[in-house]
Image (spheres, coloured by chain):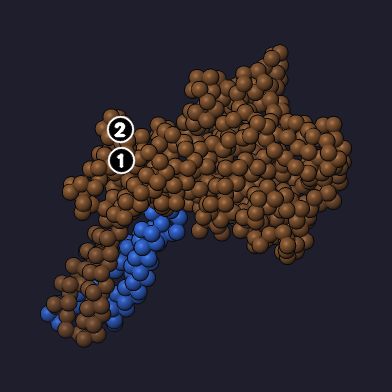
Amino acid sequence: MKIPREELLDSLKKAYEMEEIMADLLTALALPHVLASKIPEQGRQKVQKMLSVIHADTLMHQKLVSGMIKHLSE
Amino acid sequence: MEISLILEQLRQLKAADQNALDIYTDLQSKVTDPKILLALQRLVRDEAKHVAMEKEILAILQYEPQVFFSGGEKETEGFAELFSRAGIHLTVGSSGELFSKQYNRKRFDLVLLDLDGEARVKDPKGVTSLVRKIRKTHKKVIVLSSRGDLKWIRAAFEAGSSDYIVNPSNRRELIARVLATLKGRKRVCCLGGGTGLFTLLSALKTLPDILLISLVNMSDDGGSSGRLRASFGVLPPGDVRRSLVALSNAPEVMNELMNYRFDRGGELRDHSLGNLLLTGLTGMKGSMAEAVRAMGDILNIQGIVLPITQTMTEFVARFENGKVVRGESRISLCEGSDPALQVRRVWHEPHAVCDASAYASILHSDLVIIGPGDLFTSVITNLVIGKVREAISLTRAKKIYICNLMTRPGETTGLDAREHVRRIVGALGADRLDYVLASNARFSKAAIARYAKLDQHPVLMNAEDDLQGVTKAKTILADVADQKELVRHDLQKLRNQLLRFLS
């Protein structure tokens, strides 16, 4: 490791906080009615598709990062 | 959620993703544990993808649709500001400029083609040719014209126009139609009158992503409407008033005021204030259609209300015993006729002329809803207007008939749902229906008894194949009734059934 374990843990905890913020924002933005009537149908479908991809990835990232934190804390 | 709040949240999301990406990228160069390194590589790849996607989402949400208006500078006083407030970027010029080198690489989202400024367009062929020419390069075309020639409207529709605005001077209606075109909102035309139309509009008003257009029966001659019609020579205001109130976004007290009925005061007695205001506005503006537009502005209505005709006509019915009854209110009351006798034929005298905006609206709609409402005096009275029938036959919209819940003496005594639909198909001149929505609600014994005293009975449909041989339309049997006090269509249940056509 070129980085002290504690520093690595700190960085991962910061990243986990970011993932949490993202997950909360995405949960609100991905609701179907949020974008209703704001943009044309075609654009809305595209946006909702991208948001759902980011949302699914973010939930998976939370698990991944918390797994790394656990692994390094043991 | 407001668009500004959505944009703010997306910016926060992008910032959080960028922060996470920076952390993972930094750690990637400092970690040697293969398991952690593998995870970090995936995180970096995903976060970079997310940041790019979020950039694209922000661009989509912040995009200002590009609209070209061919009306020339003189016509556009205040237009740029009006469009800007609606989040639209407006370019003004002549149609000649649209084809010039200046714009030969530009693809506008919408071209507003003002025919009043097109001296070379002299006939429907000219309209077709110009609309087609524009459509080759630009995404959508809306034709604007102060002349409501139905042949021109049809030519524009057949050439692929998205809409045809007969009165471009009403800015609320113009923006509503432009936004519907740009945002791909479904245009829903509701044909009817009376309480049925009011109920339908109230049910649909709260739906997002639709442009609701109420096409209102103008042959009412009873009550306050009939008296104003006789005294002032104006088209009957009662049914348009109900539609305006149904779509109103004004404070509730304003809606109550519109419906307020004087209970004393000699000549004023039994008149509603809204009817008087519409009569006054007709005098000021020169026509009921313009009065309705002005009242729509006052009430800030969500949608468009249009009289289906601008000609003063009398609705006439011949009953099965050969007796001819003139006037909608006398037909409704089966005055001079046996209430059990059925209507055999109906027509307008003189011939009713379809309003040009109503014709254009039907042609360009996505869904045409016929009924509910009194079968002959609120619904079929619209369908027997020749050009209304023509527009319904030409439109690519889905057509649905919403069947009544109860019969009405003199109009529909003894008619079940099958016979209601048969009359509608007959009035349309051919089987144009795609769907029939009928109620299968079981009414309480108390409700049935209460209505039986008024010689009114449930309009029955037992099975989905009841309409075989009458129409090829798909039958939807559903409980859409509310029978708390009066038997009426339930707003929520009706909305839920109609949602399937609007998704």
**Horizontal and vertical percent position of residue B229:** 65, 23
Q: Secondary structure at mark 2?
A: helix
**Horizontal and vertical percent position of residue B36:** 23, 81
**Residue shown at 60%/23% (left/top)?**
B234
Question: Chain B appears in which tint?
Answer: brown
**Horizontal and vertical percent position of residue A31:** 43, 59
Residue at which label 1 appears: B69
In the image, what residue type sits under mark 1? Answer: Phe
**Residue shown at 58%/35% (left/top)?**
B353
Asked whether disc 1 touches disc 2, contact meaning CB atoms under 8 Å apart, the reply is: yes
Residue at which label 2 appears: B76
In this view, which residue lies farthest toward the left?
A2
Q: Which tag, 1 or 2, sits closer to the chain's start?
A: 1
Q: In the figure, is residue B243 to the left or right of B177?
A: right
Badge 1 crowding class, 10 Å Cα cut-off, few under 14, some 14 to 19, many 20 or more, is many
In this view, which residue lies farthest toward the top?
B266
Q: Chain of mark 1?
A: B
Disc 1 from disc 2: Cα separation: 9 Å
Q: In the figure, is residue B496 to the left or right of A46?
A: right
Residue A3: image quadrant is bottom left
